[in-house]
Amino acid sequence: MAMNDDYALTEPARAEIELLDGPTVIEFGAPWCGYCQAAQQPLAAAFADHPLVRHIKIEDGKGRPLGRSLRVTLWPTLVFLSHGKEMTRLVRPGGADAIRQAFAQIDVAGQPAR
């Protein structure tokens, strides 16, 4: 798996997220958001070390159900899941080290995402 570069305009339902197997990062943001743009390089650096982690990149906004159900209020918000359960989250991550620490909570070597 690789980091997604483009935001999905459609989002999965919360029930689908809860059924995901393996490690997953959901990134909420918008392509025009300066904070989101600044996070892309450190996020890519962290993802390079975690090739088995699924990345779901969602364009969020007012009234979008998945972001609201996960209480996303600022962008970017990174939600780190293991088998559909939130393990940690980062809001406006400061750099690759913080992202790597969050990855360590979900990525188990040899555990493929399906």
Image: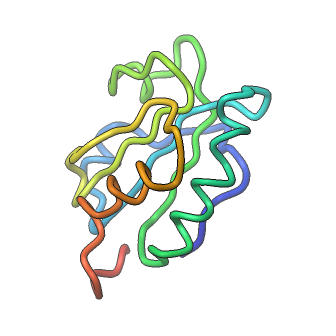
Residue pushed farthest bottom?
110
Residue pushed farthest right?
32
Question: On the image, which quarter does residue 107 sit in?
Answer: bottom left
Q: Nearer the viewer, residue 48 or 15?
A: 48
Q: Nearer the viewer, residue 79 or 19?
A: 79
Q: Position of residue 36 (x, y in %)?
A: 66, 35
Q: Position of residue 49 (x, y in %)?
A: 48, 75
Residue at coordinates 20% horizontally, 48% vertically from top-left? 85
Residue at coordinates 44% horizontally, 41% vertically from top-left? 78
Q: Position of residue 108 (x, y in %)?
A: 24, 76
Reply above or below: 41 against 77.
below
Q: Is 45 positioned to the left or the right of 52 in the image?
A: right
Residue at coordinates 42% horizontally, 29% vertically from top-left? 66
Q: Is 30 positioned to the left or the right of 83 in the image?
A: right
Question: On the image, which quarter does residue 76 sit in?
Answer: top right
What sort of colour scheme is used for the picture? rainbow
Reply above or below: 56 against 36.
below
Q: Position of residue 20 (x, y in %)?
A: 30, 59
